[in-house]
Image (tube, coloured by chain):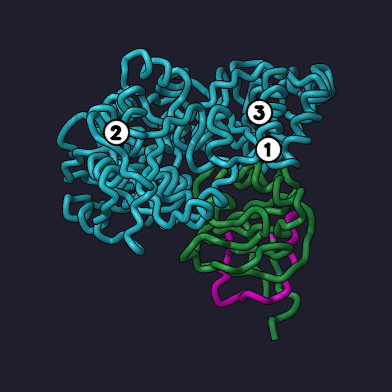
């Protein structure tokens, strides 16, 4: 099973998928010292993003995200990749600055195709994300 | 991307290693978005402080300064995380404050003008129609695109600094006509008597339409909005909706009519915002245990007229014992507010005025919350109510006069 992405940057990475129904900002939602989503009520509240391949439908806000990606990469708590349905320039600028793989646009929608816990491979040059192993 | 001879020379290192690296990075960003070329920019506004950058960002900045990086165009800084005069009183980390001094020194060596404001568009630089700039934070960008008709994408700290160094930015997004047309229509029937109401409209419109390239067109408004009202509307749209532009028929320069703002297309959706919508939204906030000990006027920083209004509302009153009320603004506004007596009135009422910062990026804010036992944060800024969640505040939007009452009575309704 694989999904195609429209735009992409970064190296080929593999990791455990975290699939969110809610958008994301590393400033609004993430504890940048632990890598855990801490915003009260966020659908991933309590989930660590460290070393994960993160699927978010949208990006939220905020200019500060540009430095935040570099900061969490420096602290070794960054995700391996961000797979956005729709993103914004800050997420892209921040991910490229930090050297984190990032993509935008997906066909089909990962809902029903990829589940949290699946092991996935992201190939930016080939523009696809592939499930290598299902979460048992 | 198609590069000019000058850009090829920069990539060849003819303007130094810092400029070469900056342009190389900008090419990668441009290629992601399918940009065909660069456009020159006249002004840059960047976010850069130790709270957002961390040690890694500071080290990168020191390395870049050591390479001899210099800004080629006027470059200013956004609000930062320390007002050094209040560092100790707020329980902020003095080692981090020392890093902030170091960081500011690096920026100044690069010819960055450290204005420390998120309302540069009200106090520092007002670009004209069609002028290309490279700005961040998001509130500055949406104001530039919408109210001035200038052209900017959201430029994060490293992207804005790169634009400052190279004097250009990749041409994509809101630099292009194709992305500047309205995509849906908003019939504004609500009265909108308070700044918080304008922010609430931004929440109600932005939250269900989260997309950078979604451009709402407001129409049928009852009156001409002020700069501060447009500021709160834009800041909330950018925050809740990640939006970079809006039109306002008869108000913003690219919206002489609804049809023109929509570029002759049918809107994807038509929505109506009424007084009842606003009242429902105000009533929907979880008041928790009705903790009312923290009231904040920040995000964006206060303009001189907001300072004047607050001084009028706080005149002769006192912040309730055990409560804290914070106002943030920039150095220019504060100097005038002091000269005009507004600051003295606020301070006499027990309000703490912080200069050059935004409350939500204050260094050590989570610890500050824990030490003070704050649960709720009450504000008239829809933006700050949205963005401060990672620090685990329960946030409540209230109108300006209500916020002042809450600060002075300790009663949250």
Q: Nearer the viewer, mark 2 or mark 1?
A: 1
* Residue B132 drawn at (x, y percent): 52, 23
Disc 1: which residue: B96
| Magenta stretch bounds | A105-127
Same chain for marks 3 and 1? Answer: yes
Mark 3: which secondary structure?
Answer: helix
Visible residue check, residue B134 = no
Visible residue check, residue A96 = yes
* Residue B281 drawn at (x, y percent): 27, 56
Furthest residue toward top: B339
The answer to whether residue A110 is magenta is yes
Same chain for marks 3 and 2? Answer: yes
Disc 2 residue crowd, few under 14, some 14–19, many 20+, Cα 10 Å: some
* Residue B353 drawn at (x, y percent): 42, 30
Mark 1: which secondary structure?
Answer: helix
Give above or below for A52 relative to B110.
Answer: below
* Residue B45 drawn at (x, y percent): 56, 26
Q: Please tell me which of labels 3 and 2 falls first in the chain.
A: 3
Disc 1 residue crowd, few under 14, some 14–19, many 20+, Cα 10 Å: some
Disc 3: which residue: B161
Colour representing chain A = green
Q: Chain of mark 1?
A: B
* Residue B229 numbered mark, or none: 2
- Choose top left, top right, bottom left or bottom right for residue A54: bottom right
């Amino acid at each position: 099973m694989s999904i195609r992405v429209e735009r992409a940057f970064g190296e080929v990475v593999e990791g455990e998928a975290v699939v969110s129904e809610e958008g994301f900002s590393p400033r609004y939602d993430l504890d940048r010292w632990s890598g855990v989503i801490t915003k009260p009520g966020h659908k991933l509240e309590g989930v660590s993003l460290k070393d994960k391949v993160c699927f978010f439908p949208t990006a939220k806000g905020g200019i500060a995200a540009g430095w935040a990606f570099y900061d969490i990469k420096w602290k070794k708590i960054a995700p391996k990749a961000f797979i956005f349905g729709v993103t914004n320039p800050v997420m892209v600028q921040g991910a490229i600055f930090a050297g984190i793989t990032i993509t935008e646009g997906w066909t089909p929608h990962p809902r029903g195709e990829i589940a949290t816990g699946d092991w996935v491979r992201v190939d930016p040059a080939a523009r696809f994300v592939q499930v290598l192993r299902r979460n048992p | 991307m198609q590069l000019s001879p000058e850009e090829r020379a920069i990539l060849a290192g003819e303007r130094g290693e810092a400029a070469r690296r900056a342009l190389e990075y900008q090419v990668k960003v441009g290629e992601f978005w399918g940009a065909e070329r660069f456009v020159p920019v006249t002004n840059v506004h960047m976010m850069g402080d130790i709270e957002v950058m961390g040690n890694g960002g500071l080290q990168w900045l020191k390395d870049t300064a050591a390479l001899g990086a210099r800004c080629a165009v006027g470059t200013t800084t956004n609000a930062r995380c320390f007002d050094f005069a209040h560092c100790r009183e707020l329980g902020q980390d003095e080692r981090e404050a020392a890093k902030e001094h170091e960081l500011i020194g690096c920026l100044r060596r690069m010819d960055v003008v450290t204005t420390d404001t998120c309302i540069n568009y009200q106090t520092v630089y007002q670009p004209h129609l069609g002028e290309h700039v490279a700005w961040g934070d998001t509130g500055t960008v949406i104001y530039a695109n919408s109210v001035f008709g200038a052209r900017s994408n959201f430029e994060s700290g490293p992207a804005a600094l790169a634009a400052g160094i190279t004097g250009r930015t990749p041409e994509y997004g809101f630099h292009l006509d194709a992305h500047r047309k309205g995509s849906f229509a908003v019939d504004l029937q609500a009265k909108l008597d308070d700044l918080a109401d304008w922010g609430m409209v931004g929440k109600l419109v932005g939250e269900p339409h989260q997309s950078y390239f979604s451009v709402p067109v407001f129409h049928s408004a009852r009156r001409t909005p002020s700069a501060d009202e447009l500021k709160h509307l834009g800041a909330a749209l950018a925050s809740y909706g990640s939006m970079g532009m809006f039109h306002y028929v008869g108000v913003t320069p690219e919206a002489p009519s609804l049809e023109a703002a929509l570029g002759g297309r049918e809107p994807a959706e038509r929505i109506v915002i009424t007084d009842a919508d606003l009242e429902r939204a105000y009533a929907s906030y979880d008041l928790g245990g009705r903790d009312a000990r923290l009231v904040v006027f920040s995000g964006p920083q206060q303009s001189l007229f907001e300072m004047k209004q607050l001084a009028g509302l706080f005149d002769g009153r006192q912040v309730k014992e055990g409560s804290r009320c914070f106002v943030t603004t920039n150095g220019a506004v504060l100097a005038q507010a002091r000269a005009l007596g507004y600051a003295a009135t606020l301070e006499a009422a027990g309000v703490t005025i912080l200069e050059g910062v935004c409350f939500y990026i204050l260094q050590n804010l989570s610890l500050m919350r824990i030490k003070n036992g704050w649960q709720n944060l009450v504000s008239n800024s829809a933006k700050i109510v949205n963005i401060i969640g990672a620090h685990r505040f329960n946030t409540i939007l209230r109108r300006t006069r209500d916020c002042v009452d809450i600060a002075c009575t300790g009663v949250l309704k």
